[in-house]
Image (spheres, rainbow, N blue to C red):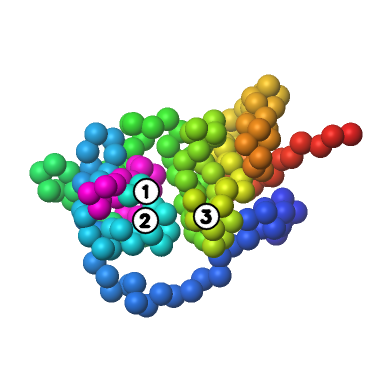
Amino acid sequence: MTKKKEDAEEVLPKKEIKEEKAKEHREPVKAYFSNERVLTESSDDARELYNQSRYGNLLDDGRVQLSLIEALYLVEKKRVKVYDSRSKEIHYENLLKKSQKTEPNFWIRYCVYRDIRNRGYIIKTALKFGADFRIYDRGVKPGEDHARWVVFPVHEGSTLTWYEFAAKNRVAHSTKKRLLLGIVDSEMDVTYYECRWLRP
């Protein structure tokens, strides 16, 4: 294991894998693709997605509104089935294609989102902070405490100017969060670099 991989493990350690037999037999939650978003049915299982792991936003009518990234992840994990307006199932590959048409840089963002979720962290959008995502410490849910990191997904082949890098650092510093750059390589593995302001 390379030094940078070891460092990444320290920043965001992997989740201990626990089999949850009780959840394996559950039917996936039904959800519907509409206007570049995904809405679940109003059910206890749908609300549990929000209550337990903070997927999406809970609406007043009991449904959960999922982002395209959250929906794709839950489809991949077989926790949600997404249907179109004609009640035809939208499988993973088709949902990915629809998402890529809608959101720029979707696949790179998804690789980082999936990696963070697989490590056991809650990750939410951070558009109001000027970042792609915000990440909460394990065991912390949004509303209970503040996010610890803001993360910017970047493909390893892309370039970042010093000005852009400083702007990202400034966003993290001004929101009192740590900056993570999630670098996605050609094999879709993600390496994280944590950056901080230092005063001499």
- Residue 101 pos. (x, y %): 33, 31
Q: Which residues are magenta?
A: 59-76
* Contact flag, marks 2 and 3 (Cβ < 8 Å): no
The first of marks 2 and 3 along the sequence is 2
User: Which residue bears the numbered disc 1?
Assistant: 56
From the image, state whether disc 1 or disc 3 is nearer to you: 3
Disc 1 is placed on an element classified as loop
Amino acid on which disc 3 is placed: Glu
23 sits to left or right of 162: left
Q: Nearer the viewer, residue 197 or 91?
A: 197
Rendered residue at 34%/77% (across/down)? 22
- Residue 130 pos. (x, y %): 54, 30
Q: Nearer the viewer, residue 41 or 2?
A: 41
User: Which residue bears the numbered disc 2?
Assistant: 50
Amino acid on which disc 1 is placed: Gly
Q: Tag 3: Cα neighbours inside 10 Å, few (<14), some, or many (≥20)?
A: few
* Contact flag, marks 1 and 2 (Cβ < 8 Å): yes
- Using the numbered discs, state the Cα–Cα distance from disc 2 to disc 3 in whole angstroms: 14 Å
Q: Is residue 61 magenta?
A: yes
Amino acid on which disc 2 is placed: Tyr
Query: How many numbered marks have been drawn onto this rendered protein structure?
Result: 3
Q: Tag 2: Cα neighbours inside 10 Å, few (<14), some, or many (≥20)?
A: some
Q: Tag 1: Cα neighbours inside 10 Å, few (<14), some, or many (≥20)?
A: many
Q: Is residue 159 magenta?
A: no
Disc 3 is placed on an element classified as loop
- Residue 23 pos. (x, y %): 34, 72
Residue 148, visible in the rendered structure: yes
